[in-house]
């Protein structure tokens, strides 16, 4: 049986300090162009730390440069972390999608003092 992949861009945000998905992180996704960034999507993470629908689906995903901006400081403050803005506030992650036919998932782990981003492609 041949399976086909539907290209999407998805993300999951995990609160390392609380050891749970980061619910309520506001975010914006931009297409990066030489004359200025173009807002493609805004929203917030759900109870699973992801968005209810893909950040980009097969109709909107293209090869190119993107920026995902997350309001981590606001989330950390609302979640009751001590010193929520000790290091992070707005967290911009700029990345490239080279092949728009392959699904891309970003896993983002945050705490008041650090973050880690992993990219998973395929499947």
Image (spheres, helix red, strand yellow):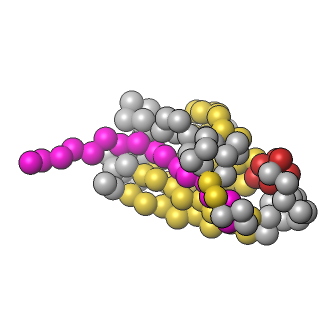
Which contiguous range is marked in magenta? 1-16
The part of the image, by quadrant, that contains residue 18 is: bottom right
The part of the image, by quadrant, that contains residue 122 is: bottom left
Q: Quadrant of the C terminus?
A: bottom left
Q: Which residue is pictured at 76% across the width and 52% down the height?
A: 72
Q: Is residue 49 above or below residue 119?
A: above
Q: Is residue 51 above or below residue 88?
A: above
Left or right of 60, for residue 35: right
Q: Which residue is pictured at 34% across the width and 50% down the height?
A: 102
Q: Is residue 38 above or below residue 123?
A: above
x and y percentages locating residue 93 in the rendered image: 64, 55
Residue 33 appears in view: no
Front residue (pair 51, 65)? 51
x and y percentages locating residue 2 in the rendered image: 12, 47
x and y percentages locating residue 80 in the rendered image: 85, 54
x and y percentages locating residue 103 in the rendered image: 37, 49
């Amino acid at each position: 049986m041949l399976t086909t992949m539907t290209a999407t861009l998805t993300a999951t945000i995990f609160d390392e300090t609380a050891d749970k998905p980061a619910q309520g992180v506001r975010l914006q996704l931009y297409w990066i162009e030489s004359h200025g960034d173009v807002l493609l999507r805004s929203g917030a993470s759900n109870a699973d730390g992801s968005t209810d629908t893909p950040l980009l689906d097969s109709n909107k995903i293209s090869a190119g440069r993107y920026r995902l901006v997350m309001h981590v400081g606001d989330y950390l403050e609302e979640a009751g972390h001590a010193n929520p803005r000790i290091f992070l506030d707005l967290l911009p992650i700029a990345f490239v999608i080279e092949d728009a036919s392959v699904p891309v998932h970003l896993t983002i782990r945050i705490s008041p003092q650090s973050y880690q981003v992993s990219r998973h492609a395929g499947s």
